[in-house]
Amino acid sequence: MDILQLIQSNLLTPIILFFLFGIIAARIKSDLKIPEAISEFLPIYLLAAIGLHGGIEMRNTGFENMLIPMLVAIGLSLLFTLNHYQILRRLGKFNIFDSYALASTYGAVGAVTFSVGLSFLKNQGVTSEGYLAAILAVLEPVAFIMAIFLTNMAVSKQIRAKKQSFTNDEPSEIDVGLKETKTKLSQVLHESITGKAIVILLGCIVIGYIIGEEGFGSIRIVFDEMFTGAIVIFMIEMGIIAGQRLGDIKRVGIFLTAFAIIMPTFNGIVGVLVATAMGLSLGGAVMFGLLLASASFIAAPAVLRHAIPQANPSLYITSALGITFPYNIIVLLPIMFTVSTIVHGEESIDLFNYITGGLI
Amino acid sequence: MKLYDVKLLTITCEILAQKNIIEILKKHDITGYTSFEVGGNGSRGLRGHGLETEKNVKVEVIMHEEKLSGVIEEISRTMFADFAIVLYVSDVGVVRTEKF
């Protein structure tokens, strides 16, 4: 009952209402549109605000206790990506390229989802650990790098198998093919690390760490008080784009639709439990869960279109943006909040022993 | 005025394919091109609206005929299967042929 009430009250927050409004505007084929420059600016602004907050809080709390959550997050993200791949490939019967592309889309993180999560917590009057912003930055490329690496491995294995069957084939062509896949990976690595999302996020974490609470005072009005307002404007745009894609959901198929709802739920709840076991706060555990539950839809097409061009982009964009994103911010966020409240309320001290005890 | 015959290769493709096109051009020693953002409808649906990464671009390249078939061959071999892309060639006249 509690969860339903929370979902209900979450539905009536400005963020969700504006998102739904955007969907309706797109469905009635209105020409309403956020000017391009603004919709390109807002993700940068949101990441800057997230980074500054993270940096300031890391200055207050120190970042020695951030290492374990970060490593655990990377480990879980990789594990989940592999898990997604097996499910998509074996149960969903997707081809190898679509499977890896989708697996990494769901293994990666969504910065917009993260912003909505922060705003949701603010609404509930709960704070979260600042270093989660740093985890957001580190997690962004991890799943993609692994998926691209594994795809290239699979492709070169195929090429090698072909090479054996045609031994009199010109070897030069195959060698070129092998070399190309290798250089692709280093290119992608370089591009994703120097990509605007990671650069602005890390840059702002550093700046936030340097300026601290006092320095932040002069820019608080822009980066703190306007934060939720900016998300609301961005939500109109997200709603419009999601609304335009609603028609495509039929093409995504039942399997992927179910995957786009069940996987984030599973990943998110595992994330909340693991974070609680590591001693993160109530809000921190929700954000940690959200990091693992969210799917990437802004970074994913840019990275994957280049690295795995064979994968069908409308599959991973539509499922991440049209299904998982609305589900995450409307339904899953309250669910994770409730789960986190329960595990923090009852035996927050014993939980770690309980889980490790269960493992041993 | 004397005009020299050269070829204009026009490629309309998704914006994320632009980089591949330019790399292929570079491989054939072509560094000059003009690109602009466009929208439209095609076999992969209405394009040019929504996400930033889903726009289309039009790339125009002027080159001598002897380079043309190599460039087109490589673009069709490496990109036609995976990307939203249309290309066509037209005859154009230029004044300064040494530029291309």
Image: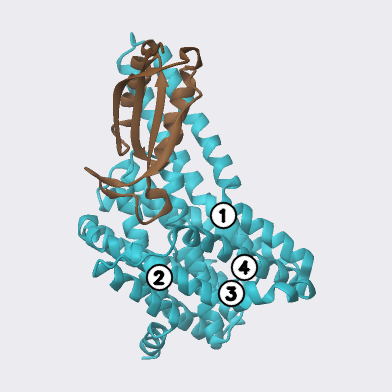
Callout 3: 10 Å neighbours few (<14), some, many (20+)? many
Cα distance between the residues tagged 4 and 1:
12 Å
Element class at badge 4: helix
Q: Which residue bears the numbered disc 2?
A: A236
Kind of residue at disc 3: Gly
Rendered shade, chain B: brown
Q: How is the image coloured?
A: by chain
Query: Do the numbered discs 3 and 1 sit on residues whose CB atoms are within 8 Å?
Result: no
Q: Which residue bears the numbered disc 4?
A: A49
Residue at 45% over, 58% down: A36
Q: Which residue bears the numbered disc 1?
A: A197
Cα distance between the residues tagged 4 and 3:
17 Å
Q: Which residue bears the numbered disc 3?
A: A284
Whole-percent x, y for residue A193 in the image: 59, 46
Q: Which one of the lettered chains is coloured cyan?
A: A
User: Which quadrant of the figure contains the C terminus of chain A?
Assistant: bottom right
Judged left or right of residue B3, residue A199 is: right
Whole-percent x, y for residue B14 in the image: 36, 41
Cα distance between the residues tagged 3 and 1:
22 Å
Asked if badges 4 and 2 are on one and the same chain, I answer yes
Kind of residue at disc 4: Ala
Residue at 54% over, 71% down: A287
Kind of residue at disc 1: Ala
Query: Do the numbered discs 4 and 3 sit on residues whose CB atoms are within 8 Å?
Result: no
